[in-house]
Image (cartoon, coloured by chain):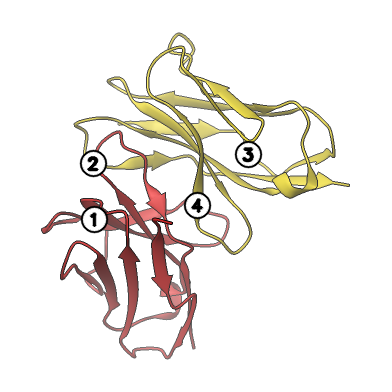
Chain colours: A red, B yellow
Amino acid sequence: DAMVIQNPRYQVTQFGKPVTLSCSQTLNHNVMYWYQQKSSQAPKLLFHYYDKDFNNEADTPDNFQSRRPNTSFCFLDIRSPGLGDAAMYLCATSRDPSGETQYFGPGTRLLVL
Amino acid sequence: GDSVTQMEGPVTLSEEAFLTINCTYTATGYPSLFWYVQYPGEGLQLLLKATKADDKGSNKGFEATYRKETTSFHLEKGSVQVSDSAVYFCALSERGRDDKIIFGKGTRLHILP
């Protein structure tokens, strides 16, 4: 089945220690998104790639970076995680932007010690 | 700017009860409207969508009708099950506008056996 895969499902890191979360998709979609979701809140868009074009949200901290080496993979790098970065991180894809359905992965829950 | 407002939860119902979760939106153009569902510990799944006025989206016994005159997209189900317990997000996405989905804050639904 075509799908969006996130690894790992749970990630534990230490305060200030860089961490990378990964996302892959078999849908061959053009757009990939990263969201941060904290408890009992809606997902918050961090950034997205439309093909190779990177689009950062204005309020996304510099601590968060992303890479998309090819169509199938996208990575979220947190350079120096703080306690406030503990959250669920959701990857999503869509065929094209604007008005299109987004397909979400299962998420990676990040714990910062 | 565009926004989505949905009823606050939690909503607690008994099994086989009728469900309505209200959702209204503001948009400058003609958005697509979505309901996403998030089960505990999981990512978001598309439940249903509607792309133009008077369209009805339906899936798994859930329905929602795109009402342009009242700018609403209320979610309904005639007989809920315990397995419907989840968080439900109403959302919109507007073609040509920032490549984003705008989510409501989510409504947590508890179904009691």
Kindly identify which residue carries mark 1: A48
Tell me the crowding category of disc 2: few under 14, some 14 to 19, or many 20 or more residues within 10 angstroms, Cα based: many
Residue lying at the far front of the rendered structure:
A1
Tell me the crowding category of disc 4: few under 14, some 14 to 19, or many 20 or more residues within 10 angstroms, Cα based: many
- Name the secondary structure under disc 3: loop
Whether tag 1 and tag 3 are in contact, CB under 8 A, the answer is: no
Mark pair 3, 4: CA separation: 18 Å
Mark pair 2, 1: CA separation: 10 Å
Which tag, 3 or 4, sits closer to the chain's start?
Answer: 3
Question: In which chain is the residue bearing label 4?
Answer: B
- Name the secondary structure under disc 4: strand
Kindly identify which residue carries mark 4: B44
Mark pair 1, 3: CA separation: 29 Å
Whether tag 2 and tag 1 are in contact, CB under 8 A, the answer is: yes
- Viewer-proximal residue among A58 and B35: B35
In this view, the mark in front (3 or 4): 4
Q: Quadrant of residue A64?
A: bottom left
Q: Position of residue B1 (x, y in %)?
A: 30, 31
Mark number for residue A97? 2
Hey, what amino acid is under mark 4?
A: Leu
Residue lying at the far right of the rendered structure:
B113
